[in-house]
Structure formats: C-alpha cells, structure tokens
Image (spheres, helix red, strand yellow):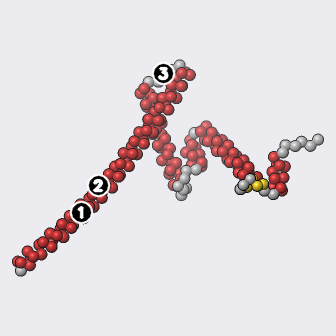
Amino acid sequence: MRLSIVGHRPAVLAGSKKRLERFSQVRRRRRTAGDTAMAAEEEQSAYTQRLRAAVHYTVGCLCQETGEDKQIEFSKQTIAAIAETTFRQCENFAKDLELFAKHGKRTTVNTDDVKLLARRSKALLNFITEKCNDLASSNAEQKEKKTVTTGKGKKKSDGHLESMVIENEDVTVD
C-alpha cells in the first residue's frame, strides 16, 4: 500500500506542476491586461493634462485681453483658479449631457440636451436657441439647393423648378 501511495506521488506532482504552469500563464495574462489598463489610464491622464493646459492657456489669453481692455492685472493664482473652475464645470457639463442623452435612450447628445443644460441661464439659452435656429434654416436652404439638382447635375422636372421660382421671387404687381 505504501508503494502505491508513493507511486502516485509523481503523478500528483505532475498535476501540481501543470496547475502551477496554468496559474503562471493566467497571472502573466492578468499582468498583461493590467499593463494594458495601466497604459490606457496613463494615456487618459496625459490627455486630461493636455486639456487642462489648453484651458489654462485660453483662460490666460482671455484674462490678458480683458485686463488690457479694463486696465487691470490678473495674478497667476487667479488665472489658475479660473482655469481649474472652468475645467471642472466643463467636466460637469459633459457628464450632464451624457446623462440627458442616456435618459432619452440615445448614444448621441443633441441640441435639446444642450438647451436643457442651459435652462438655468436665460441669456445662454436664448443664444443657443438662436444659433440652433440659424443652423436649422441654413440646413434647410442647403437641402433645398440639393433638391434642385440630383446626381450628376441633372435638373428635376420643370414643374418643381417653377414652384420654387414662384416662391422665391419678390414681384410687385402694379
């Protein structure tokens, strides 16, 4: 009996070796996945730092321009504080816009989401609404121009063109 137990020992050790190898492979894969995640995190951090630097630069330029107009100076700490506040507010806006779109069961933020975000500032809401209306009318004009010609520049039926000419002409009858 003793021999049989001893006889099975190499098989048990071989099984343990295989398990150890599998464990090492999984560990290496996890380490590789962890390295990939770490690299992605470092890349995201670098991207965020570049954005922060861009916001800081823009705020500095705006403060300098405003300072020249109003004959005042902004300290470096003031510019840094304004830049940090601006960056954080933009992060909050981005999160809110994502949530508004998600609530609407969409993956894309649209103009209604932006208007909803701006609802607390009447002036901003009016400005955004005006710009949206301008864009909508511009898009409608472009679509109208596209319907006049199709494909390789061939014109559509004369009846369609006639109705457009009548709508667009400013004729006074004496």
Q: Do the residues under discs 3 and 1 have CB atoms within 8 angstroms?
A: no
Q: Is residue 153 left or right of residue 100?
A: right
Along the line of sight, the residue nearer the viewer: 144 or 137: 144
Tag 2: Cα neighbours inside 10 Å, few (<14), some, or many (≥20)? few
Q: Earlier in the sequence, mark 3 or mark 2?
A: 2
Q: Residue beneath label 2, please?
A: 31
The percent coordinates of residue 103 (x first, y second) are: 52, 55
Tag 3: Cα neighbours inside 10 Å, few (<14), some, or many (≥20)? few
Q: Residue beneath label 1, please?
A: 23
| Mark 3 vs mark 1: in front | 1
The percent coordinates of residue 114 (x first, y second) are: 57, 46
Q: Is residue 131 left or right of residue 18?
A: right
- The image quadrant that residue 150 belongs to is bottom right
Q: Earlier in the sequence, mark 2 or mark 1?
A: 1
Name the quadrant of the C terminus. Answer: top right
Residue at the far front in the pictured view = 152
| Mark 3 vs mark 2: in front | 2
Q: Residue beneath label 3, please?
A: 73
The residue at the point 47 percent across, 32 percent down is: 57
Under circle 3, the secondary element is: loop
Residue type at tag 1: Phe
Residue type at tag 3: Glu
